[in-house]
Image (spheres, helix red, strand yellow):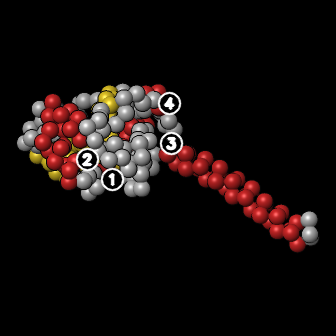
Amino acid sequence: MSGLFSPGEYQARWSKIHEDMAAKGYEAALIFGKGGGSYDRCGDVLYLSNYYSCASGQEVDNPLNTARSFSAILLQPGEAPELIIDEPDPRHDLLSIERVSGHSNIMTAAGKALAARGIDGPVALVGADFLPVKYWRLLDAAAPGTQWVDDETLVQRARRIKSPAEMEVFREAGEIATRALDLLMEGLVGGCQRSRSGG
């Protein structure tokens, strides 16, 4: 198991996105996420890899670290997914992706990983709507000549239809939340009754 779901669940998710990529003529997709801080966009990366950056997202770029709290997944049909993260030693047993590398500069690393594939056709860029201009420049410089196509809905389309495994997790979460709220209300009502009786 990788987190809440089996490896087969993640493989099915990757397959759905590969199908959409083929339909749109993409040769690859570079999917960004951001965890930590006050503005999270971790959903797509978390959905595909079970990875969430624990960096605060508020660190100032410096010679040792750039783009902390960001992460990226490189998807290419026929290739294993590649997870590019901001920490050197994650909990591999919790990740759904085996091909993982940690870097001090996510943007340059992601661009170089893409450039190393020698891709000639269009590449979907998921996350352009929240990448700072500075980071976009680093990415583009590391993968010169890439035919970028912004597609903010590529992963969202796959996420819309929930699998049986996801629905089971929702049911379990609902039961837990219901029990917690019941206990809270019992405590509140009990406190009010004691207060009225002078207890």
Mark 1 to mark 2 CA distance (whole Å): 9 Å
Marks 1 and 2, the one that precedes in the sequence: 2
Discs 1/4, front: 4
Residue 122 position, x and y percent, is 13, 45
Marks 1 and 4, the one that precedes in the sequence: 4
Residue 165 position, x and y percent, is 50, 42
- Circle 2 sits in a helix, a strand or a loop, which is it? helix
Marks 4 and 3, the one that precedes in the sequence: 4
* Residue found at the far bottom of this picture: 196
Marks 2 and 4, the one that precedes in the sequence: 4
Look at 20% across and 33% down and name the residue there: 113
Instruction: Please name the residue that numbered disc 2 is placed on.
Output: 20
Residue 93 position, x and y percent, is 47, 27
Binning the other alpha carbons within 10 Å of mark 3 as few (below 14), some (14 to 19) or many (20 upward) gives: few
In the rendered structure, which amino acid carries the disc numbered 2? Asp
Mark 4 to mark 3 CA distance (whole Å): 12 Å
Q: Residue 88 appears in which quarter of the rendering?
A: top left
Mark 2 to mark 4 CA distance (whole Å): 26 Å
Marks 3 and 2, the one that precedes in the sequence: 2
- Where 104 sits versus 187, above or below? above
Instruction: Please name the residue that numbered disc 4 is placed on.
Output: 1
**Label at residue 165:** 3
- Where 140 sits versus 11, above or below? below
Binning the other alpha carbons within 10 Å of mark 4 as few (below 14), some (14 to 19) or many (20 upward) gives: few
Instruction: Please name the residue that numbered disc 1 is placed on.
Output: 157
Q: Are marks 1 and 4 in contact (CB under 8 Å)?
A: no
Q: Residue 30 appears in which quarter of the rendering?
A: top left
Q: Are marks 1 and 2 in contact (CB under 8 Å)?
A: yes
Residue 44 position, x and y percent, is 36, 47
Mark 1 to mark 3 CA distance (whole Å): 18 Å
